[in-house]
Image: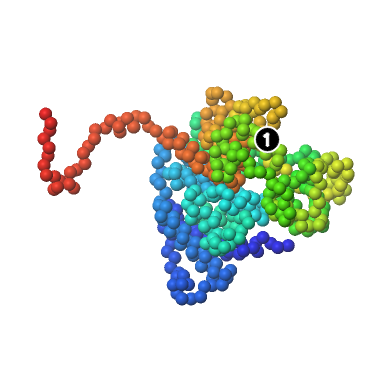
């Protein structure tokens, strides 16, 4: 098996690369001087591609290029947000993945100070890219959506990758390699000087007037902090958790794993694995299980086909380009503006079609002769058998497995999120605000929160619980309201909308009507004429 870490995107000496990146400070934009001359200036031959000298030269070039452009961008604007008594923070962002880092940086560039980022994971483990993500490449096109850079192309993945590997290397990419994306996010955090409190978990949200008291836990120590705004950028798992199929609920967890968890790959060699589901996560789980030496992998798909994206060697005709109200990449951020009926029906279509599987993920598993797909087939009647094995029925046939993996995605259920225990029943859901037409009912859709235009929770009742508008839900629970899987890479197109909404609220909350009136009505005091007095030829007489 070829380790992903052996590919060209991962051969960088990361300590050497990030040592230079860490020297950049966005607050002062004073990148360290890079004194090394280029080969053309010294007359020396260029180092061999891929050699340590070439990697070091690329790292220095990246430091110099990024520092120069950040300097041109100027210092962060001054913090204009008026201090609020009793508030420790203006904004707390839960989650330090690509969304949390990008939103924090964008708020700073907007002039919003006292922004804090927390993540329950340790350094280098935030997000999914080094943990439960198992694909070789991101599932989105490499140029489809803006990234965390917030309009500063010097901070984009493309600038980072091309500086290290050259433009031809980027052009040759099909999609962004997963581990390269993880490395890029580490670099982005360091060059933007985004501070993260790792190992910090949000336990509970307690309203205190229009402020939010956050009960946190870090290193086993509990503490309470207050914030004016809270952003839940905690990914797909922050809206209800993994969807566990009923067939597994009666089994001990030692014999099954959800694809969002840690699959025990070191125990699967020579074993029989069953996979429930046929989406992207399911195929990635199949791929790593087969690469780990599983004797057989059996995938069970309740649908009669597998939906995939990409161009195989013999491609069947693909569906036509969707109408604009299905969401073009260039206008994804406008999907919220669609009427409720269109947003609801778009969600229903997504439920029917499910997310398509990248063709490389499909081919990764199909390449193994011991991989088998069962269409229009569900597993039922799972039970423990002898020797720690599991039996289950598939289409009337009893099969035996050593381990089962659920590739069944996530559910939306705010009541299942511990941190929302005190407030979830006050949040408006789609079932509270929209009545589907006959035949278009969907209980799962009804559990999605009905979000405001800035991703904020809305109160279920006409009066009360106004504090909910200060909680911005930038995770999968926003999918129905905004038409895309919020928190995924393509949803970064909506970061400006979120940042503007937070800034607007803080701006209006900072207004002081009395101080404004005093300022407007204060008598104008002429400036000292000394700088121009010598040039004055005379003074006009006052008109009678």
Q: Quadrant of the N terminus?
A: bottom right
Tell me residue 472's x, y (percent): 54, 37
Give the class, few, some or many, for how many residues have Cα within 10 Å of label 1's Cα (few <14, many ≥20).
some
Q: Camera-side residue: 48 or 197?
A: 48
At a point 61% along the width and 39% down the height, the residue shown is 323
Q: Which residue is mark 1?
A: 348
Vertically, is 372 above or below 2?
above
Q: How is the image coloured?
A: rainbow
Q: Is residue 358 left or right of residue 516?
A: right
Q: Is residue 421 left or right of residue 519?
A: right
Q: Quadrant of residue 426?
A: top right
Tell me residue 457's x, y (percent): 56, 33
Q: Camera-side residue: 187 or 144?
A: 144
Q: Is residue 340 visible?
A: yes
Q: Is residue 306 left or right of residue 511?
A: right
At a point 57% along the width and 41% down the height, the residue shown is 332
Q: Secondary structure at mark 1?
A: helix
Q: Is residue 182 visible?
A: no
At a point 56% along the width and 36% down the height, the residue shown is 336
Q: Quadrant of the C terminus?
A: top left
Image mark count: 1
Vertically, is 266 above or below 498?
below
Q: Residue furthest top?
A: 462
Tell me residue 451's x, y (percent): 57, 33
Q: Quadrant of residue 322?
A: top right
Vertically, is 110 above or below 463?
below
At a point 82% along the width and 54% down the height, the residue shown is 296
Q: Camera-side residue: 307 or 461?
A: 307
């Amino acid at each position: 098996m070829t380790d992903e870490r052996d590919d060209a995107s991962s051969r960088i000496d990361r300590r050497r690369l990030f040592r230079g990146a860490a020297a950049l400070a966005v607050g002062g934009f004073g990148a360290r001087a890079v004194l090394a001359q280029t080969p053309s200036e010294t007359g020396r031959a260029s180092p061999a591609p891929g050699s340590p000298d070439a990697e070091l030269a690329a790292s220095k070039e990246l430091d110099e290029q990024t520092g120069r452009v950040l300097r041109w961008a100027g210092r962060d604007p001054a913090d204009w947000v008026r201090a609020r008594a009793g508030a420790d923070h203006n904004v707390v962002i839960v989650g330090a993945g690509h969304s949390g880092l990008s939103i924090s940086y964008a708020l700073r560039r907007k002039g919003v100070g006292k922004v804090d980022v927390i993540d329950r994971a340790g350094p280098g483990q935030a997000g999914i890219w080094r943990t439960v993500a198992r694909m070789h490449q991101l599932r989105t096109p490499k140029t489809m959506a803006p990234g965390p850079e917030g309009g500063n192309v010097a901070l984009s993945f493309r600038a980072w990758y091309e500086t290290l590997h050259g433009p031809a290397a980027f052009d040759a990419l099909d999609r962004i390699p997963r581990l390269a994306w993880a490395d890029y996010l580490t670099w982005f955090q360091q060059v933007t000087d985004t501070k993260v409190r790792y190992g910090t978990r949000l336990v509970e949200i307690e309203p205190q007037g229009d402020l939010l008291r956050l009960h946190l836990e870090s290193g086993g120590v509990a503490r309470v902090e207050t914030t004016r705004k809270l952003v839940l950028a905690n990914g797909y798992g922050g809206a209800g958790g993994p969807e566990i199929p009923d067939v597994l609920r009666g089994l001990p967890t030692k014999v099954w794993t959800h694809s969002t968890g840690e699959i025990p790959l070191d125990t699967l060699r020579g074993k029989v694995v069953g996979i429930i589901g046929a989406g992207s996560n399911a195929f990635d789980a199949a791929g790593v299980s087969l690469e780990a030496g599983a004797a057989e992998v059996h995938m069970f798909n309740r649908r009669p086909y597998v939906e995939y994206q990409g161009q195989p060697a013999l491609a069947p005709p693909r569906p036509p380009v969707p109408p604009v109200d299905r969401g073009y990449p260039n206008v994804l951020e406008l999907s919220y503006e669609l009427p409720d009926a269109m947003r609801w029906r778009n969600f229903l279509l997504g439920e029917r079609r499910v997310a398509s599987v990248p063709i490389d993920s499909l081919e990764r598993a199909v390449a193994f002769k011991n991989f088998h797909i069962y269409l229009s087939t569900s597993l039922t009647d799972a039970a423990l058998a002898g020797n720690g094995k599991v039996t289950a029925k598939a289409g009337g046939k009893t099969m035996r497995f050593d381990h089962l993996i659920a590739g069944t995605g996530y559910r939306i259920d705010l009541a299942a999120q511990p941190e929302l225990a005190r407030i979830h029943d006050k949040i408006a859901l789609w079932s509270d605000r929209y009545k589907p037409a006959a035949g278009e009912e969907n209980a799962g859709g009804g559990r999605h929160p009905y979000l405001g235009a800035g991703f904020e929770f809305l109160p279920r009742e006409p009066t009360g619980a106004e504090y909910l508008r200060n909680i911005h839900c930038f995770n999968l629970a926003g999918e129905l309201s905004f038409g895309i899987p919020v928190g995924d890479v393509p949803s970064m197109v909506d970061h400006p909308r979120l940042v503007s909404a937070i800034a607007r609220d803080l701006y209006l909350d900072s207004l002081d009507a009395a101080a404004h009136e005093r300022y407007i009505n204060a008598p104008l005091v002429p400036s000292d004429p000394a700088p121009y007095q010598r040039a004055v030829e005379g003074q006009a007489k006052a008109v009678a």
